[in-house]
Image: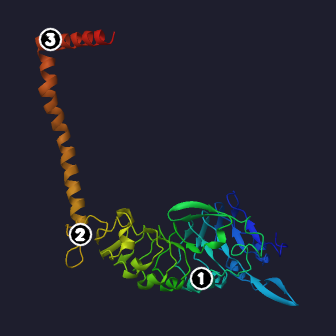
Amino acid sequence: MGSLMWLGSLHLHNNHLSGDVPVALKNCSSLMVVNLSESEFTGNIPAWMGNFNGKFGKMYEFIGHDKEIIYELGLMVLVLHSNKFNGSIPLELCHLHFLQILDLGNNNLSGTIPRCFGNFSSMIKPSNTTSPFSIHNENHFAIGSMDSATLVMKGVEYEYHNTLGLLTGIDLSRNKLPGEIPEELTGLHSLIFLNLSHNHLQGKIPVKIGAMTSLESLDLSMNRISGVIPQGLATISFLSHLNLSYNNLSGKIPSGTQLRGFSPFSFIGNPELCGATLTDDCSEDGKPKSPIPDNDDTEDSGWIEMKWFYLGMPWGFVVGFCAILAPLTFNRAWRHAYFQFLDEMKHKLLGWFL
């Protein structure tokens, strides 16, 4: 495989491949699409993947009269989700200036999100319609219809084919990433989807998140993010999927028709959050009007109720026995009458059905 210098796309997804990613792959310097998802690769994400940055791959386009345009070809799609990669995300990936889609979701990654992710040039600038790549313009390169990848977009798993190159997004969900969301990510103005859910992220939502004007899907659920929701989030016009549930967010949900259109499920699991679509209205100090239960009091109350439940079980048995079973056991006349009654009821029921 290492001898395939001009290999443009590599799809080994949905296999049972295991172990480390083959080192020979780093010689395939012309790769634009790498999809190794849904396998059993282990170890660290190779740092040498950052070398697929267009330094060695070039394409020439002749426009007549001895004129030509030289394009650099670099890695544009890297999909490694649903493997067993561990360790930190290598900083070398920040050298992938042509990268449009980065999917490292559903692994065991544990390092912080690199701040240099804000340097992804193709996620900063709007899509270039004169791009030489087929995934932007099919008149130049013919591989666009053959490339595909399964990505989670707006909370749903889709398989993208010839529209793959129209997307820009980052998916780091379902890992063990600690730390804060880097402020540098807000500079990715052409990013369409961002999924950081199911991690150990803390801190606040970046204040400048409103600068991500192309964002259509944002999922920060199942983390430990605190603080208020920035007002700028309500100004993202294209935002159609939002999930901030099960964090430690507080205060009033920013006003604006954009956020009011989302269901309460986008915000649940944040006890100190109020306003907008939630049932809890906000008081003057920006806190929910309904009292927030103290976790310690709730746990103590639950333990007391459970203790009395178990203490009452034997007494309930004694009372039930004395009230019903004891008379039938010690009083012969009552016992005969009881069983005669049951026998008559049995014959009546059989008569109705037969």
The answer to whether residue 298 of the structure is visible from this angle is yes
Q: What element carries label 1?
A: loop
Side of 15 relative to 266 (left or right): right
Depicted 4 relative to depicted 303: above or below: below
Q: Where is mark 1, residue-wise?
A: 126
The percent coordinates of residue 283 (x first, y second) are: 20, 74
Depicted 56 relative to depicted 283: above or below: below
- The quarter in which the N terminus is drawn is bottom right
The percent coordinates of residue 201 (x first, y second) are: 44, 75
* Earlier residue among tags 2 and 1: 1
Q: What residue type is labelled 1?
A: Pro
Side of 54 relative to 298 (left or right): right
Which residue is at a point 24% across and 65% down the rendered structure image? 296
- Determine which of the numbered discs, if any, sits on residue 337 in the image: 3
Mark 3 surroundings within 10 Å by alpha-carbon count, few (fewer than 14), some (14 through 19), many (20 or more): few
Number of the front mark, 2 or 3: 2
- Determine which of the numbered discs, if any, sits on residue 281 in the image: 2
Q: Is mark 2 on a helix, strand or loop?
A: loop
Q: Do the residues labelled 3 and 1 touch (CB within 8 Å)?
A: no
Quadrant of res 165: bottom right
The image's colour scheme reads rainbow
Which residue is at a point 67% across and 58% down the rendered structure image? 14
The answer to whether residue 44 of the structure is visible from this angle is no
Q: What element carries label 3?
A: helix
Number of the front mark, 3 or 1: 1
Q: How far apart are marks 2 and 1 (CA)?
A: 39 Å
Query: Can you name the residue that lies furthest to the front here?
Result: 65
Query: Can you name the residue that lies furthest to the bottom here?
Result: 66
